[in-house]
Amino acid sequence: MSDQDTPIVLSDLSDEDLVVQMHDDLYDGLTNEIAEGTQILLDRGWTAYDVLQDALVEGMRIVGIDFRDGILFVPEVLLSANAMKAGMALLRPILAETGAPKVGTMVIGTVKGDIHDIGKNLVSMMMEGAGFDVIDIGVNNDVESYIEAALENNADIVGMSALLTTTMGYMRVVIDTFKQRGIRNDYAILVGGAPLNEAFAEEIGADGYCRDAAMAVEMAIKVMESRQGSAAATKLYNTG
Ligand code: B1M
């Protein structure tokens, strides 16, 4: 057996080499190896957030480049996405662990025509970890699904995700419909996804653009602080 045929023992690798190997394994859609690598890094004392960012999100960024350049195709990228989910499944309970009292409620989903859900799932996990109740309505949501979930769950925040330039425009439809129904001001609407930017969020009338999951948490907490501030102010006004 030549050196090249020797199987790689993930636990023998240094942290740095393991992370590089995980990028390769994610690229190759190797679910078991991604789960194993994730667990090894956690056992070595890495935080769930660092494993997520350095090993998984960075690996998926590399996949994205070759997908864009026509080197990888949908079936291969689906395998990568599944491998990423295997790693995320191990991180989820850690990221969602919180002793904090409930901060607020968020409904989140990917918009109509769009089935990308990895980023949305990450946002959900991080929001749960920050003490939010998260109602994840999945992918391919029309405006009625957002409205129904927001009303049913008495949500504070509605989050929308879009990964395609062809689907991001639907966010405007959702926001306009909330306005037409007279419920726009009952919710903070936060948006995110790779093709979006601040200017787009402003143009469609969202309350905030979240570049990543950490920013989504930051913004959501700010929203709740200002909501609680205005609720307290209303209370003072009503009793005063
Ligand atoms: Co798709 N795809 N894809 N894809 N895919 C992209 C998005 C693309 C940029 C690839 C490329 O060309 N480089 C390209 C879009 C081009 C464009 O619109 N201009 C593309 C395309 C073209 C397509 C298809 C049309 C391909 C085809 O069929 N010919 C097709 C469309 C299907 C559809 O939705 N109708 C398609 C299909 C797929 C797969 C099914 C194979 C798979 C999805 C699997 C899944 O999600 N379950 C897939 C994948 C994996 C990708 C890439 C490679 C990776 C996306 C991802 O998961 N990133 C992607 C390339 C890329 O983005 N670089 C690509 C990792 C994730 C952690 O990041 O989702 O950005 P992201 O989420 C971040 C932030 O954006 C933010 O926080 C997250 C965490 O930090 N965020 C939010 C996201 N949502 C938020 C919501 C919030 C807040 C923050 O609410 C408050």
Image: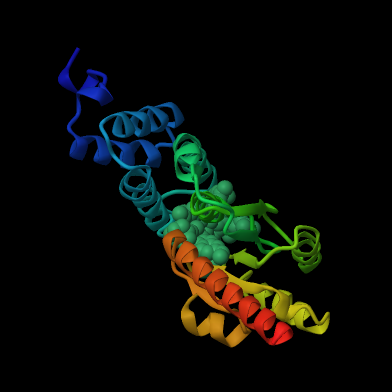
Q: Can residue 140 be spotted in the picture?
A: yes
Display coloring = rainbow
Q: Is residue 198 left or right of residue 135?
A: left
Residue at 25% from the left image edge and 24% from the top image edge: 11
Q: Is residue 191 left or right of residue 139?
A: left
Q: Can residue 163 be spotted in the picture?
A: no
The x, y position of residue 100, in whole percent, is 50, 50
When asked about the image quadrant of residue 17, the answer is top left
Task: Decide: is 179 above or below 78.
Answer: below
When asked about the image quadrant of residue 158, the answer is bottom right
Tag count: 0
* Front in this rendered view, residue 170 or 158: 158
Quadrant in which the N terminus appears:
top left
The x, y position of residue 102, in whole percent, is 59, 54
Task: Decide: is 174 above or below 66.
Answer: below
Task: Decide: is 218 above or below 51.
Answer: below
Residue at 50% from the left image edge and 36% from the top image edge: 89
Q: Is residue 80 left or right of residue 38?
A: right
* Front in this rendered view, residue 7 or 42: 42
The x, y position of residue 103, in whole percent, is 57, 59
Residue at 47% from the left image edge and 37% from the top image edge: 83
